[in-house]
């Protein structure tokens, strides 16, 4: 699956959140994911042919931006205006659309009766409407709240969540996650030259694989039990 990340941020170079996500993407070490920062050309308009050439070549488009005045930054709206026109927009149907949204406010402030008054789903509804209009499959958004105040442990979890958001299929299962972990561990074992680290990573990958096989066995056993019980009822 090929993925394109379009970053829309008024001060991207000064953003600690965007710097972290860029490093997380590098550590994912995937040739199927490209990242591009939207920068408005000198003329004030995007070249639709150039922009959409990249978009039409991928399976998943991820819009990555901070919640800016309860919406997306102006550069993303300008990109919509300049690029989402015929004949390009008709060719987007069937692709996936992901949203990676950062906020300066804590998550608990969003919602009816809360300080912000609206949920993030409500604030992002215009993008959901756009996805429907273009025939895109909208993925659940990945929300990053108050990155600067998160702990190291939360940052580590965010790194995993972000990489999985980019790489796992839509509606992924627990088995998909396990497979992803095994691939990550095997990949890192192959990249390191430290024998001790190789051994540890290989052991972890083997343990994940064993647990995954055991889970499959349990599923088969439960299916067999269900068949027997249904047979008894008959």
Image (tube, rainbow, N blue to C red):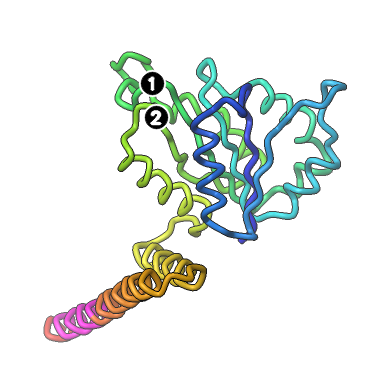
The segment highlighted magenta reads: 218-230
| Residue at 41% from the left image edge and 67% from the top image edge | 185
Q: Does the magenta stretch include residue 226?
A: yes
Image location of residue 206, percent across then percent down: 33, 77
Q: Left of 23 or right of it: where is 195?
A: left
Of marks 2 and 1, which one's residue comes earlier in the chain? 1
| Residue at 50% from the left image edge and 30% from the top image edge | 16
Residue nearest the viewer, comparing 204 with 103 = 204
Residue nearest the viewer, comparing 63 with 231 = 63
Q: Residue 105, labelled with which disc?
A: 1
Determine which quarter of the picture holds residue 45. Answer: top right
User: In the rendered view, would you say 150 is above or below 138?
Assistant: above
Mark 1 packing: few (<14 Cα in 10 Å), some, or many (20+)?
some
Q: Left of 102 or right of it: where is 233?
A: left
Q: Quadrant of the C terminus?
A: bottom left
Image location of residue 117, percent across then percent down: 36, 15
Label 2: which residue? 145
User: In the rendered view, would you say 197 is above or below 112?
Assistant: below
Q: Left of 71 or right of it: where is 59?
A: right
Residue nearest the viewer, comparing 211 with 114 = 211
Query: Are discs 2 and 1 less than 8 Å apart at CB?
Result: yes
| Residue at 57% from the left image edge and 25% from the top image edge | 14
User: In the rendered view, would you say 79 is above or below 2?
Assistant: above
The tally of labels here is 2
Determine which quarter of the picture holds residue 37. Answer: top right
SS category of the residue bearing label 2? strand
Q: Residue 217, labelled with which disc?
A: none
Q: Distance between the residues labelled 2 and 1?
A: 6 Å
Mark 2 packing: few (<14 Cα in 10 Å), some, or many (20+)?
some
């Amino acid at each position: 699956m090929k993925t394109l990340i379009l970053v829309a941020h008024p001060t991207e170079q000064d953003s600690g959140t965007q710097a972290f996500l860029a490093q997380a993407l590098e550590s994912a070490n995937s040739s199927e994911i490209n990242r591009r920062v939207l920068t408005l050309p000198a003329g004030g308009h995007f070249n639709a042919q150039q922009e959409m050439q990249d978009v039409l070549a991928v399976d998943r488009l991820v819009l990555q931006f901070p919640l800016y005045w309860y919406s997306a930054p102006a550069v993303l709206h300008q990109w919509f205006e300049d690029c989402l026109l015929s004949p390009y927009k008709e060719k987007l149907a069937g692709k996936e659309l992901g949203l990676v949204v950062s906020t300066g406010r804590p998550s608990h402030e969003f919602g009816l009766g809360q300080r912000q008054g609206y949920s993030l789903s409500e604030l992002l509804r215009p993008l959901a409407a756009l996805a429907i209009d273009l025939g895109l499959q909208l993925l659940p958004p990945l929300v990053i709240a108050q990155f600067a105040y998160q702990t190291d442990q939360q940052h580590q979890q965010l790194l995993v969540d972000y990489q999985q958001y980019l790489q796992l299929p839509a509606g992924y299962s627990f088995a998909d996650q396990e497979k992803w972990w095994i691939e990550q561990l095997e990949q890192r074992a192959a990249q390191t030259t430290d024998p001790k680290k190789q051994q540890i990573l290989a052991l972890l990958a083997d343990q994940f694989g064993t647990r995954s096989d055991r889970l499959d066995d349990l599923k088969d056993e439960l299916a067999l039990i269900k068949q027997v019980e249904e047979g008894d009822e008959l």
